[in-house]
Amino acid sequence: MDLNGFDRPGRPAAGDTRSVKVMIAGGFGTGKTTMVRSVSDIKPLTTEETLTQASADVDHLIGVADKTETTVSLDFGKISLNESLVLYLFGTPGQERFWFLWNGLFKGALGAVVLVDTRRLASSFRAIEEMERQNVPFVIALNVFPDSKEHPVEEIRDALDISPHTPIVACDARDRTSSRDVLVALIRHLKERSAVALESR
């Protein structure tokens, strides 16, 4: 698939490399840090700290009892989808006590991936609300955990209360190819939105 020209018609000029800021968002423990680590071409910058007993009541470990670390600021990675398109990935912290950082992180973002754990759909409601509030185009990535149950896509869409135009894809955040496919789906979504916007002018 041609990933060029998603934000303007035509192919980029020779040597023209586009840089795009992409957010990796979602609830606590949905796999944001894992996705950035798995797909980044460079050693990612992470700001994880060890979870302590003192934070157990704050971080709500239901469904993620094995989680031992948490992002306290951001995760950062970089991937070149082709020779002309580079994505800079910014993973958001998932816990409510760090949400105040989101406004700064979202500045300049062209699009976002919202990771969802189907065992805990409510954990990603806040991230979806933030995308809609800041008018950031996004795709939903259903991170498939070993004990996740399969649900029809439309059932997930209804439960998350998202637009029929918002893509939903399944992924394994641990797998580089799977995570890359999610980013490709996002770029395709941005390109389609751009084409619609141009046609409506």
Image (cartoon, rainbow, N blue to C red):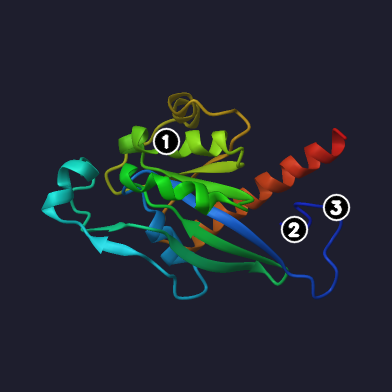
- Residue at figure coordinates x 54%, y 50% from the top left: 106
- Residue at figure coordinates x 50%, y 58% from the top left: 90
- Residue at figure coordinates x 57%, y 68% from the top left: 79
Report x, y in % for residue 32.
40, 54
Up-down relation of residue 9 to residue 16 (above or below) = above
Using residue 37 as the reference point, say whether residue 6 is left or right of it.
right
**Which mark, by number, is residue 126?**
1
Q: CA distance from mark 2 to mark 3?
A: 12 Å
**Label 2: how many residues lie within 10 Å, few (<14), some (14-19) or many (20+)?**
few
**Which mark, by number, is residue 181?**
none
Amino acid type for the residue under numbered disc 3: Pro
Residue at label 2?
A: 2
Q: Nearer the viewer, mark 3 or mark 1?
A: 1
Element type at mark 2: loop
Q: CA distance from mark 2 to mark 1?
A: 33 Å
Up-down relation of residue 171 to residue 50 (above or below) = above
Element type at mark 3: loop
Q: Earlier in the sequence, mark 2 or mark 1?
A: 2
Contact between labelled residues 3 and 2, with CB atoms less than 8 Å apart:
no
Element type at mark 1: helix
Which quadrant would the N terminus be assigned to in this image?
bottom right
Q: Earlier in the sequence, mark 2 or mark 3?
A: 2
Asked whether 180 or 45 is in front, the reply is 45
Using residue 190 as the reference point, say whether residue 52 is left or right of it.
left
Up-down relation of residue 62 to residue 157 (above or below) = below
**Which mark, by number, is residue 9?**
3
**Label 3: how many residues lie within 10 Å, few (<14), some (14-19) or many (20+)?**
few
Up-down relation of residue 77 to residue 24 (above or below) = below
Q: Nearer the viewer, mark 2 or mark 3?
A: 3
**Label 1: how many residues lie within 10 Å, few (<14), some (14-19) or many (20+)?**
some
Amino acid type for the residue under numbered disc 1: Arg
- Residue at figure coordinates x 51%, y 62% from the top left: 177
